[in-house]
Protein backbone atom coordinates (compact mmCIF):
# COMPACT_ATOMS: atom_id res chain seq x y z
CA UNK A 1 0.00 0.00 0.00
CA UNK A 2 2.84 2.38 0.82
CA UNK A 3 4.17 2.03 -2.73
CA UNK A 4 0.77 2.74 -4.30
CA UNK A 5 0.22 5.77 -2.07
CA UNK A 6 3.72 7.08 -2.82
CA UNK A 7 3.25 6.61 -6.56
CA UNK A 8 -0.14 8.34 -6.44
CA UNK A 9 1.32 11.45 -4.82
CA UNK A 10 4.16 11.65 -7.32
CA UNK A 11 1.87 12.58 -10.23
CA UNK A 12 0.19 15.84 -11.19
CA UNK A 13 -2.76 14.17 -12.95
CA UNK A 14 -5.76 13.21 -10.80
CA UNK A 15 -6.77 10.36 -13.09
CA UNK A 16 -3.27 8.86 -13.05
CA UNK A 17 -3.25 9.01 -9.24
CA UNK A 18 -6.58 7.17 -9.02
CA UNK A 19 -5.50 4.62 -11.63
CA UNK A 20 -2.45 3.80 -9.51
CA UNK A 21 -4.70 3.16 -6.51
CA UNK A 22 -7.06 1.12 -8.70
CA UNK A 23 -4.28 -1.24 -9.71
CA UNK A 24 -3.39 -1.68 -6.05
CA UNK A 25 -6.91 -2.69 -5.01
CA UNK A 26 -7.29 -5.05 -7.99
CA UNK A 27 -4.03 -6.77 -7.10
CA UNK A 28 -4.33 -6.88 -3.30
CA UNK A 29 -7.94 -6.98 -2.13
CA UNK A 30 -10.21 -9.98 -2.03
CA UNK A 31 -9.78 -13.71 -1.99
CA UNK A 32 -7.78 -14.51 -5.11
CA UNK A 33 -8.62 -18.21 -4.74
CA UNK A 34 -12.40 -17.65 -4.75
CA UNK A 35 -12.65 -18.55 -8.44
CA UNK A 36 -11.51 -22.08 -7.65
CA UNK A 37 -14.27 -22.73 -5.10
CA UNK A 38 -17.31 -24.76 -6.14
CA UNK A 39 -20.22 -22.54 -7.15
CA UNK A 40 -18.20 -19.35 -7.37
CA UNK A 41 -18.32 -19.26 -11.18
CA UNK A 42 -21.22 -20.16 -13.45
CA UNK A 43 -20.63 -22.16 -16.63
CA UNK A 44 -18.77 -20.06 -19.16
CA UNK A 45 -17.49 -17.56 -16.58
CA UNK A 46 -13.83 -16.90 -15.85
CA UNK A 47 -12.59 -14.95 -12.88
CA UNK A 48 -11.34 -11.45 -13.54
CA UNK A 49 -11.31 -8.19 -11.60
CA UNK A 50 -12.27 -4.64 -12.47
CA UNK A 51 -12.09 -1.34 -10.66
CA UNK A 52 -12.99 2.24 -11.36
CA UNK A 53 -14.18 5.50 -9.91
CA UNK A 54 -17.57 7.06 -10.50
CA UNK A 55 -17.18 10.79 -9.91
CA UNK A 56 -20.30 12.86 -9.28
CA UNK A 57 -20.96 15.68 -11.71
CA UNK A 58 -23.62 17.69 -9.82
CA UNK A 59 -24.38 20.02 -12.70
CA UNK A 60 -25.39 17.03 -14.83
CA UNK A 61 -26.97 14.94 -12.05
CA UNK A 62 -24.82 11.99 -13.07
CA UNK A 63 -21.52 10.23 -12.39
CA UNK A 64 -18.72 9.62 -14.85
CA UNK A 65 -16.41 6.61 -14.87
CA UNK A 66 -12.70 7.41 -14.72
CA UNK A 67 -9.50 5.50 -13.95
CA UNK A 68 -11.20 2.27 -14.95
CA UNK A 69 -9.26 -0.98 -15.01
CA UNK A 70 -10.63 -4.01 -16.84
CA UNK A 71 -13.65 -2.24 -18.33
CA UNK A 72 -14.38 -2.54 -22.07
CA UNK A 73 -13.06 0.34 -24.18
CA UNK A 74 -16.58 1.36 -25.19
CA UNK A 75 -17.37 2.12 -21.54
CA UNK A 76 -14.53 4.62 -21.17
CA UNK A 77 -16.12 7.80 -19.73
CA UNK A 78 -19.39 5.96 -19.10
CA UNK A 79 -21.97 8.10 -17.32
CA UNK A 80 -24.69 6.78 -15.06
CA UNK A 81 -27.38 8.57 -13.10
CA UNK A 82 -26.40 9.44 -9.53
CA UNK A 83 -29.13 7.16 -8.18
CA UNK A 84 -28.36 4.15 -10.37
CA UNK A 85 -27.85 0.75 -8.78
CA UNK A 86 -25.53 0.09 -5.91
CA UNK A 87 -23.19 2.96 -6.85
CA UNK A 88 -26.17 5.27 -6.45
CA UNK A 89 -26.95 3.80 -3.04
CA UNK A 90 -23.36 4.38 -1.90
CA UNK A 91 -23.48 8.03 -3.02
CA UNK A 92 -26.96 8.63 -1.57
CA UNK A 93 -26.01 7.09 1.78
CA UNK A 94 -22.34 8.13 1.93
CA UNK A 95 -21.64 4.59 3.10
CA UNK A 96 -19.58 1.65 1.85
CA UNK A 97 -21.06 -1.65 0.72
CA UNK A 98 -19.89 -5.21 0.14
CA UNK A 99 -21.82 -7.71 -1.95
CA UNK A 100 -20.10 -11.09 -1.44
CA UNK A 101 -22.51 -12.64 -3.97
CA UNK A 102 -24.36 -10.26 -6.28
CA UNK A 103 -26.83 -13.04 -7.12
CA UNK A 104 -28.18 -12.66 -3.58
CA UNK A 105 -28.90 -8.93 -4.03
CA UNK A 106 -32.19 -8.36 -5.87
CA UNK A 107 -31.34 -4.69 -6.47
CA UNK A 108 -27.91 -5.29 -8.02
CA UNK A 109 -27.81 -3.98 -11.58
CA UNK A 110 -25.19 -4.88 -14.13
CA UNK A 111 -23.29 -1.81 -15.30
CA UNK A 112 -20.30 -3.53 -16.89
CA UNK A 113 -21.31 -4.27 -20.50
CA UNK A 114 -19.16 -7.37 -20.97
CA UNK A 115 -20.12 -9.55 -17.99
CA UNK A 116 -22.05 -9.79 -14.76
CA UNK A 117 -19.76 -9.53 -11.76
CA UNK A 118 -20.31 -12.04 -8.96
CA UNK A 119 -18.83 -10.11 -6.03
CA UNK A 120 -18.37 -6.37 -5.57
CA UNK A 121 -17.43 -3.63 -3.14
CA UNK A 122 -17.93 0.11 -3.09
CA UNK A 123 -16.64 2.95 -0.91
CA UNK A 124 -17.56 6.63 -1.13
CA UNK A 125 -14.94 9.28 -1.82
CA UNK A 126 -15.62 11.78 0.95
CA UNK A 127 -14.28 15.32 1.21
CA UNK A 128 -15.26 17.72 3.99
CA UNK A 129 -18.58 15.97 4.52
CA UNK A 130 -19.49 15.77 0.82
CA UNK A 131 -19.51 12.74 -1.45
CA UNK A 132 -17.27 13.28 -4.49
CA UNK A 133 -18.05 9.87 -5.93
CA UNK A 134 -17.03 6.31 -5.18
CA UNK A 135 -14.54 3.60 -5.92
CA UNK A 136 -15.83 0.25 -7.13
CA UNK A 137 -14.06 -3.10 -7.15
CA UNK A 138 -15.58 -6.28 -8.54
CA UNK A 139 -14.65 -9.81 -9.50
CA UNK A 140 -16.62 -12.34 -11.46
CA UNK A 141 -16.04 -15.03 -8.82
CA UNK A 142 -18.65 -14.94 -6.11
CA UNK A 143 -17.39 -14.54 -2.54
CA UNK A 144 -14.23 -12.74 -3.65
CA UNK A 145 -14.95 -9.89 -1.21
CA UNK A 146 -16.09 -9.77 2.39
CA UNK A 147 -16.37 -7.25 5.21
CA UNK A 148 -12.70 -7.99 5.98
CA UNK A 149 -11.73 -6.16 2.77
CA UNK A 150 -13.82 -3.08 3.42
CA UNK A 151 -11.52 -1.12 5.80
CA UNK A 152 -8.68 -1.17 3.28
CA UNK A 153 -11.00 -0.11 0.45
CA UNK A 154 -12.24 2.76 2.62
CA UNK A 155 -8.66 3.81 3.33
CA UNK A 156 -7.90 3.82 -0.41
CA UNK A 157 -11.11 5.81 -1.04
CA UNK A 158 -10.05 8.43 1.52
CA UNK A 159 -6.64 8.75 -0.09
CA UNK A 160 -8.21 8.87 -3.56
CA UNK A 161 -10.50 11.71 -2.46
CA UNK A 162 -7.56 13.71 -1.15
CA UNK A 163 -5.60 13.08 -4.35
CA UNK A 164 -8.60 14.07 -6.48
CA UNK A 165 -9.00 17.37 -4.64
CA UNK A 166 -5.31 18.23 -4.33
CA UNK A 167 -4.56 17.46 -7.99
CA UNK A 168 -7.45 19.51 -9.35
CA UNK A 169 -10.08 16.87 -10.02
CA UNK A 170 -12.78 19.53 -10.29
CA UNK A 171 -10.81 21.27 -13.03
CA UNK A 172 -10.15 17.91 -14.68
CA UNK A 173 -13.91 17.34 -14.86
CA UNK A 174 -14.56 20.80 -16.23
CA UNK A 175 -13.86 19.25 -19.62
CA UNK A 176 -16.97 17.09 -19.21
CA UNK A 177 -19.23 19.69 -20.78
CA UNK A 178 -17.04 20.03 -23.85
CA UNK A 179 -15.81 16.44 -24.04
CA UNK A 180 -12.23 17.58 -23.48
CA UNK A 181 -10.45 15.10 -21.21
CA UNK A 182 -6.89 14.05 -20.92
CA UNK A 183 -6.19 10.78 -22.77
CA UNK A 184 -6.87 7.58 -20.85
CA UNK A 185 -3.83 6.60 -18.83
CA UNK A 186 -2.81 3.11 -19.90
CA UNK A 187 0.31 2.96 -17.76
CA UNK A 188 0.56 1.04 -14.54
Image: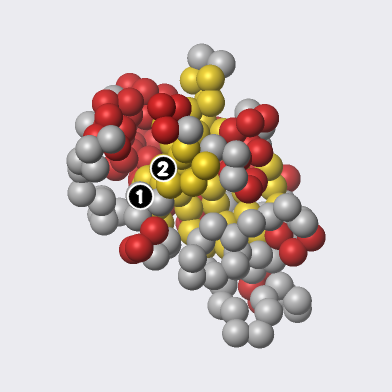
- Write down the residue under mark 1: 77
In the picture, the quarter occupied by the C terminus is bottom left
Q: Residue at x 28, y 35 (%)?
A: 177
Quadrant in the rendering for residue 84: top right
Is the residue marked by circle 2 packed among few (<14), some (14-19), or many (20+) residues within 10 Å? Answer: many
Looking at the image, can residue 139 be seen? yes
The structure residue drawn at horizontal position 54% and vertical position 47%, both measured from the top left corner, is 136
Figure colour scheme: secondary structure
Question: Could you say where residue 91 lies in the image, as x and y percent from the top left?
Answer: 59, 33
73, 67: nearer the viewer? 73
x and y percentages locating residue 68 in the rendered image: 40, 52
Q: Residue furthest bottom?
A: 43
Q: Which mark is residue 64?
A: 2
Q: Is residue 62 left or right of residue 99?
A: left
45 vs 33, nearest the viewer: 45
Which element carries disc 2, helix, strand or loop? strand
Residue 166: name its quadrant: top left
Foreground pick, 95 / 31: 95
Q: Residue 59: horizontal and vertical position, in percent? A: 41, 27
Residue located at (66% from left, 38% from top): 89
- Please identify the quarter of the rendering in which residue 179 is found: top left
Rendered view: 139 above or below 174: below
Classify 10 Å Cα crowding around label 1: few (below 14), some (14-19), many (20 and above).
Answer: some
User: Is there CB contact under 8 Å for labels 1 and 2?
Assistant: yes
Give how far apart the Cα atoms at labels 1 and 2 are: 6 Å
Badge 1 or badge 2: first in the primary sequence: 2
Residue 36 percent location from the top left of the image = 66, 76
Label of residue 25 in the image: none
Q: Is residue 145 left or right of residue 20?
A: right
Residue 151 in sight in this render: no
* Residue in the picture at 69% in, 47% down: 98
Using the image, determine if residue 144 lies above or below residue 129. below
Amino acid sequence: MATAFTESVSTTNPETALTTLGHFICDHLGDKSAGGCPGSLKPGETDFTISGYFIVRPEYNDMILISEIGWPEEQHRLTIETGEGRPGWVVDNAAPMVLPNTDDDATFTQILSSARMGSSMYAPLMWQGSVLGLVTLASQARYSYSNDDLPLLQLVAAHAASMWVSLGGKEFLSGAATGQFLPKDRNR
